[in-house]
């Protein structure tokens, strides 16, 4: 994010992992796994992963609002 990130997204992989990815200033997509799922493949993420994603999205949106002011 400090290296010129422009667009951000928090999503869930097919393995139920929470992932943050963004496109940097050069247009290259950079991603980081926020929560591992230890090799399991659920149909959807667990309740705790959903809560973590929601909390992180909320925090990220608040951070962006503060930085834009």
Image (cartoon, helix red, strand yellow):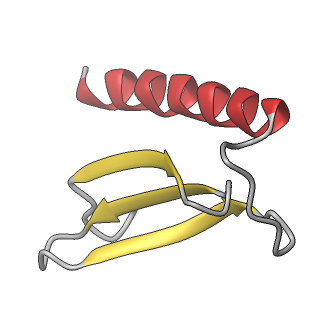
Which residue is drawn at the image coordinates 20% and 54% (left, top)?
6
Establish if 2 lies above or below 48: below
Residue 17 versus residue 24: which sits nearer the camera? Answer: 17
What residue do we see at 42% from left, 26% from top?
61
- Asked if residue 23 lies left or right of residue 52, the reply is left
Q: Looking at the image, can residue 1 be seen? A: no
Q: Nearer the viewer, residue 67 or 12?
A: 12
User: Viewer-proximal residue, 48 or 69?
Assistant: 48
Is 39 on the left or on the right of 19, as rendered? right
User: Residue 7 at x, y = what percent?
Assistant: 23, 50
Q: Say which quadrant the C terminus sits in.
A: top left
Q: In the rendered view, would you say 55 is above or below 37?
A: above
Please report the residue visible at 68 percent of the width from the left and 54 percent of the height from the top. Answer: 16
Q: Quadrant of residue 50?
A: top right
Q: Quadrant of residue 59?
A: top right
| Residue at x 46%, y 21% (from the top left corner) | 62
Residue 3 percent across, percent down from the top left: 33, 71
Q: Is residue 28 visible from the viewing direction of this image?
A: yes
Q: Is residue 2 above or below residue 57?
A: below
Q: Residue furthest left?
A: 26
Q: Quadrant of residue 49?
A: top right
Q: How many marks?
A: 0
Q: Is residue 65 left or right of residue 11?
A: left
Q: Which percent across, then down, holds residue 45?
A: 70, 43
Which quadrant does the N terminus fall into? bottom left
Nearer to us in this view, 60 or 39: 39
**Residue 54 spot, x, y in % from top left:** 61, 26
């Amino acid at each position: 994010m400090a290296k010129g990130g422009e667009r951000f997204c928090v999503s869930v992989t097919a393995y139920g992992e929470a992932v943050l990815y963004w496109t940097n200033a050069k247009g290259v997509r950079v991603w980081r796994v926020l929560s591992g799922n230890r090799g399991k493949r659920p149909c959807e993420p667990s309740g705790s992963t959903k809560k973590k994603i929601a909390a992180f999205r909320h925090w990220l949106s608040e951070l962006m609002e503060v930085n834009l002011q």
